[in-house]
Image (spheres, rainbow, N blue to C red):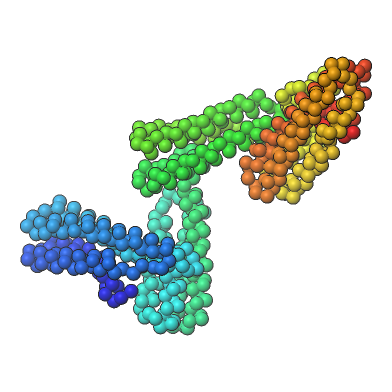
Amino acid sequence: MSDRLQFSFEFLAPSSMEFLGNLNRYHADQLSRDEYVSVIEKRSQAMEGARSLILNKAPISANPVAAERQRKCIKILNDAMDDLATVIPQLLEYADNKTEEKYQELVMRLGRILTVECQTIDYYELAECAVSGPTDMPAINAIYRDQKRFYAQEISQAAYLLTIDKAINKFQSAYDEMDKRSDDDSEYKSDLMYAYRQTIEALETVKSSVSEGEEYCLGLMQTAVEYAKSIRENLSLYSKHRLIQGPTRMYQANYVYNMAKFWQNGRLETAAFLRMLDIFADNLDATVRRIQALAALPNDREQEIDAHVEVMQEGFLEQFRSIDLFKQGAAGDAAAIEQAFELLVAGAEKAADTSAELLAMGDSLNQINCMQCGAANPRGSRKCSSCGARLLDADSMGFASSSTVSYSEEGGMGGGSDELMVTPELGRLFKAVDAATEGRISKEQFAEEIAVYRQFVDNTFNADMMAQYMLTHFEDPNKDLPQRVEEVSNEMKAATQTILEALDALYLYVGETNSHHIVNGVLGLKDGNVRMQKLHGKIKAMSQGHDNAEEFMPSGFDMLTDGDAGIGFVG
């Protein structure tokens, strides 16, 4: 940067300061009227010269990202000088009309312009450092850059130390601002303040050791860089912590609430706000589907759980409605905004209430009551922790107490029902799903359970072998057996494919830990197995022409809930 251009940039902020200083001196009668008018006019002319130089000669970085930032800074500076130009006539008018009200108004306007100028010049000078250096913090990157330039004798020691002082002042201001926030005593705030303090101390060490030699100071600077990186990490955690604090017990709703307030106050662009609403809607939709899938898992409190899930879904629907209202507000309907806030809070709180109830219910489902004294014990216990009596746990008796199945009188089969019949193999997999999502088993263990069920499917659901058996053993009084067998075979292949795709979804969860895959897997398993049990009823009906139908059922296919083999045909 040329000396003349450097002077122009440094001149800008003091120019506003000079206007402000002379205004204060004239207000305090330390300048005559003529002296005051003269200095205002001179500063006005100098400002226009600086404007022309900056607009036409300001160097632009070769880095496209930095260049874009620098151009924005130049535009902001130009706008600030336009504002200052409108204040100058009022400053001259004040020479003949010294009132306290006018003085206060001019002080405020000049103060705002001065702040914009100082910050914008700083951003311009650090624009390239924002995209090049060991961190994503321009102030640290500027020290890193100037340290190398100083030891290469490209800049003076004073210029190098000034860069360090600017960074220290920035971090100290941020530390002081954090310290003022008495409403937050979280660990996130403490960790962030500690990172600021450590960085400041490291930079002060770098500054005081400037005469110790390049290699030594580069090592000190590396320490400062690491501390600065921890600022960014802790700042991200602290920001998330602050954003999820709010009027509800649902952190996603609080995040939307706070972002909506930012948008309402002009601190967030409308396009970004609308994108955030779409993301929130997607998250809500995924949560609703996951709740539906988990509610479909076997349990022995189905009606009670369904009632809570229904209320929870009402809460989610109110949140969906709030999204629509926020979008209406973004389109210009101001009245919709306050209603959106109210619905968002009400819906989130409704969902939170039922969520707490479901969690409590989940705890109770993991308990077994003693038949002798009534004490609650963890499921799987052999003896009562209170009286020592032997516990009769349904799991230890060979069937799942949480089954949703309504067994029929004959063999525990539901025929063509839409209600899921849980076999031992499927029940084992469902338990593994619960354990995996709750972190009670490792990913490797979950993958092994999926593989066990996959082997069971491969060995059991053989549509071609079943079709051959039916064509060989079933009677055909209506001469349409081949057609019906083909239909059943195709249905079995489709149901098998659904189950295999569900298992693939569970495998994806092992790799990505995304609850969306669990939802798809559970729903697919339920759908595929319900279709299989319907096929069982259809095949059994087709075999009714025999005197002893059970003898003609394929070995391993008469098993929906009471057998050892599961659903299918093993030959």
Quadrant assignment, res 47: bottom left
Residue at 46% of width from left, 39% of height from top? 247
Quadrant assignment, res 461: top right
Q: Quadrant of the N terminus?
A: bottom left
Q: Where residue 13 sits in the image (x, y, percent)?
A: 26, 65
Residue at 20% of width from left, 57% of height from top? 107
Residue 364 vertical position relative to residue 15 in the rendered view, above or below? above
Residue at 20% of width from left, 65% of height from top? 48
Left-right relation of 452 to 140: right
Residue 116 vertical position relative to residue 472 in the rendered view, above or below? below
Q: Nearer the viewer, residue 311 or 327?
A: 327
Q: Where residue 255 sits in the image (x, y, percent)?
A: 47, 43
Left-right relation of 93 to 256: left
* Total labels drawn: 0
Q: Nearer the viewer, residue 429 or 199?
A: 429
Q: Quadrant of the C terminus?
A: top right
Left-right relation of 391 to 57: right
